[in-house]
Amino acid sequence: MSQLKDAILSVTARGDKAFIPYIMAGDGGLEKLKPTILKLQQLGVAAIEVGIPFTDPVADGPTIERAGERALANGTTLRKVVETLTSFADELTVPLVAMTYLNPILAYGVEQFAADAKGAGIRGLIIPDMPLEESETVQPALSDAGISLVQLVSLTSTPERMERLTKASEGFIYAVTVNGITGARSSFANELEEHFKRIQSYTDTPVLAGFGISTPHHVTDFSSFCSGVVVGSKIVDSLVNEDWAAIEELVSASKVAAVK
């Protein structure tokens, strides 16, 4: 079993739901990466998704796009993020999930990236612009390094496509809750519970909800029919505003959800 999947299952096994916050590496400077990750870890999150800024993102909403622009303006690169994470990897107690695009990995060198990422505490990888059919570009090197390649499943995926994606996904299934970009939402489609049950029917890998989740109520609602949630834009906004109380409230909701 992958270390990422094991970490999520250990959370659900004790009766909680997995909470994975997304942060943009380099937003506010790379010097903030260590204290932010260690504080989130202290709050009891299951894993932490570390976004790598990219000049041409395909799914980022305004909040994360602006965070990426600020990070790029600070000179943030994939290599610098990996180096920064490596400097405190021995203090990590939760797995990191890197979210980056394919081109920076190819420019880095796939094998070298996988080896360096392992040393940086990265145990999962999301590549939103890489279709399943091209996963062999990185899969062998990632497998050798013990890094799970997480697949995204959209609302528009056909049943056949959904089954292929869920069976290929490692660590967890990233189930997208909306048709569109990231960002806070006030409401979601009514049929999502059935959609998530359909995804879970194909695999024993945990299914987590992501995109648009921004309130404790969202966290408890989604956690009632999946293994947990990924929260991005609200976390990014809260970090910019240094509003740790809002972040703690979101994390706490994942624990309350498990007992409802």
Image: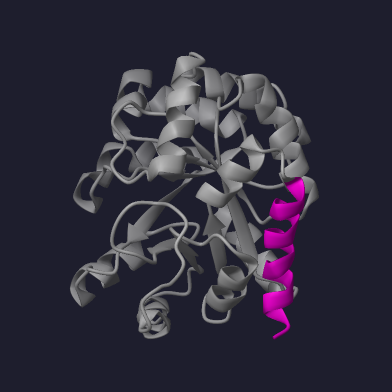
Q: Report if residue 241 is visible in the image.
A: yes
Looking at the image, residue 82 sits to the left or right of residue 191; the answer is right
Vertical order, 70 against 158 (above or below): above
Of 118 and 14, nearer the camera is 14
Q: How is the image coloured?
A: one colour
- In which quadrant is the N terminus drawn? bottom right
Residue at 58% over, 43% down: 237
Locate residue 77, reporting x and y percent.
46, 19
Residue at 33% over, 38% down: 138
Vertical order, 148 against 200 (above or below): above
Looking at the image, residue 70 sits to the left or right of residue 21; the answer is left
Q: Report if residue 99 is visible in the image.
A: no
Of 168 and 55, nearer the camera is 55
Q: Is residue 254 magenta?
A: yes
Locate residue 120, reporting x and y percent.
61, 30
Q: Does the magenta stretch include residue 223?
A: no
Residue at 35% over, 84% down: 191
Locate residue 175, reporting x and y percent.
40, 65
Image quarter of residue 65: top left
Image quarter of residue 141: top left
Q: Is the magenta region chiefly helix, strand or loop?
A: helix
The residue stretch that appears in magenta? 244-260
- In which quadrant is the C terminus drawn? bottom right
Residue at 63% over, 46% down: 95
The number of numbered badges drawn on the structure is 0
Vertical order, 255 against 138 (above or below): below
Looking at the image, residue 3 sits to the left or right of residue 244; the answer is left
Of 137 and 244, nearer the camera is 244
Of 110 and 239, nearer the camera is 239
